[in-house]
Image (cartoon, helix red, strand yellow):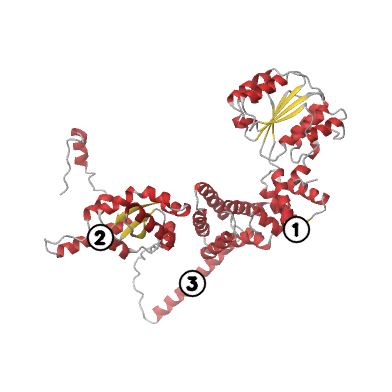
Amino acid sequence: MAYQALYRVWRSQRFDDVVGQKAITQTLKNAIVQQKTSHAYLFTGPRGTGKTSAAKIFAKAINCKHSVDGEPCNECETCIAITEGRLNDVIEIDAASNNGVEEIRDIRDKAKYAPTQAEYKVYIIDEVHMLSTGAFNALLKTLEEPPQNVIFILATTEPHKIPLTIISRTQRFDFKRIGTQDIVDHMAYILKQINVDFEEQALYVIGRAAEGGMRDALSILDQTISFSDEKVTLADAMQVTGSLTYEMMDQYISSCATGDVEAALETLESILSSGKEARRFLEDLLLYCRDLLMFQQAPKLLAEKVGHLTDRFKELAGQTAAEKIYQMIQILSETQNDIRFTNNANIYLEVATVKLAKSVNPVAISSETAPQAATEDIAALQQQIEHLQKELIDLKKNGVAAKESEPAKPTRTVSNKSTLRIPTEMVYKVLNEATKDHLLNVKNVWDDLLQMMSVTQRAMLKASEPVAAGPKGLVIAFEYEIVCGRAMEDEELQLAVHNNLSRLVNYAPDMVCITKESWPKLRQSFIHQNKDTSSEQSTNEQPAADENHLLADEQPPQEVNNQVVDEAIAIFGSELVEVIND
């Protein structure tokens, strides 16, 4: 027989085999034993949590003549036929491909006939939310007044798409995500049954990657067995799931927690170059930070959930303040939302890394060690004061009068917000020859130019605009400094702009990159210099640059908020008032 996937071979055949849904399976068993079954059920919940399996088990249990405590025997002809899918009275329907009114009308007509081989006719409609509005209306009357000995089981992952009129006529059971420990225990049981060696940590990695779905977990386990040559190891599980190793996360978070931006960026570059996916990377980091908090509050509970914890992880948990971890989680969550709609997630990850490393204090000190550190600082300051007092007494004894001390001026630390070097000379060179026509030509074809670029290049140019253009040069202002820096170093991007503009408007300028924040200052500085130069020239000579072009694009707001002008506009209206600046 051909090989079957693990999730098919190990599909639950009894209620007790359904993992992590004890409350639901016990309720269904009791209903069968007490003969209080409903005519319609709605099973909802995430994928791979046992909805369809529970529906088939229910169909077997209610029709099995040898059931014990609500469980099917799985040995009689009826149970075997249902398991193999060949019993005519148990009908499985995929609503995704049978979602029309005609299909539901056909079900409604056939449901009127009594079951032929079993005691109950059971309809299992999977992904029921895919039914059309007309199909739901056709099903509604049947659910309201069902024929005798007919049971409908509706299964869906999106219950909010089902009309309330349908939900109100069913018994609803919400299947929850399966816990990581339950998934790990079930996978360990299966591996022991098929005689495959495994490392326990590998199962925890797979369990986390499955995100609460047993089917996903068994599919990943199947892949890992094939990849690891019949032995499930931690390294292979990391490779298959695309997860980060604990050492990688230890190194990255450690660099961020100690404020070492350079080391953090190097670690990020190493992680991304090894092929790790950005979204998976952020999920792993969020889980890691969550684990740090849990270890600080409940170390035994985390050890039971995760298993092995590295020594570096324990050191980080002891040295990093909880406030620092809260801030890291917030930054990571915001970045996770930002990268959902971008084609270049690496930029957001680099920005997030800098934020993580510079958040709160460069070196985070836990609340336990903070009082000790404060005491040491106070003691050091007291020693310095005593030393200065002794020097002052010695100076007075030697006849040196102390000058009356002037009040100390508060020192002001000026933070250099921009670390990017703006090519001022190149900008001035373009402005010296800039014309309005060149700029308008570029702006008219800017959207077409973006469509001709690659996905990555388009993402970089999306938050930019041309602000000045001359015969040989084009100045582009970027909204974000980090994107501007990358554009400066990206020779392929500059060449693409050069070539594509040549195709569109027969204009091939060299690209000069600046930030939008620096553009107003550069423009004003150039205009002032130009005016000074032109004043020294004779009246017959014309200035080299077109000042009207420079001022037309972005003029600084004129201060006309005069009270008299406002009152005049209020009395006579803006149409009749003309403001003339001296």
Where on the picture, by quarter, is residue 81? top right
- Badge 1 element: loop
Q: Given this view, does label 2 or label 3 mark the residue nearer the observer?
A: 2
Q: Residues within 10 Å of mark 2 (few under 14, many from 20)?
A: some
Q: Given this view, does label 1 or label 3 mark the residue nearer the observer?
A: 1
Judging by the rendered image, the residue that carries numbered circle 1 is 229
Indicate which disc, 2 or 1, sits on the residue closer to the N terminus. Answer: 1
- Badge 3 element: helix
Residue that appears at 79% across and 51% down: 191
Residue 370: image location, x then y, percent: 58, 60
Judging by the rendered image, the residue that carries numbered circle 2 is 433
Residue 348: image location, x then y, percent: 50, 54
Task: Answer left or right for 116 relative to 165.
Answer: right
Task: Answer left or right for 231 relative to 468.
Answer: right
Q: Nearer the viewer, residue 533 or 181?
A: 533
Q: CA distance from mark 2 to mark 1?
A: 68 Å
Where on the picture, by quarter, is residue 7? top right
Q: Amino acid at mark 3?
A: Gln
Residue 528: image location, x then y, percent: 22, 60
Q: Amino acid at mark 1?
A: Asp
Residue that appears at 19% across and 35% down: 575
Q: CA distance from mark 2 to mark 3?
A: 61 Å
Q: Are marks 1 and 3 in contact (CB under 8 Å)?
A: no
Q: Amino acid at mark 2?
A: Glu
Number of on-image labels: 3
Indicate which disc, 1 or 3, sits on the residue closer to the N terminus. Answer: 1
Judging by the rendered image, the residue that carries numbered circle 3 is 384
Quick one: quadrant of the N terminus?
Answer: top right
Q: CA distance from mark 1 to mark 3?
A: 67 Å
Residue 518: image location, x then y, percent: 34, 57
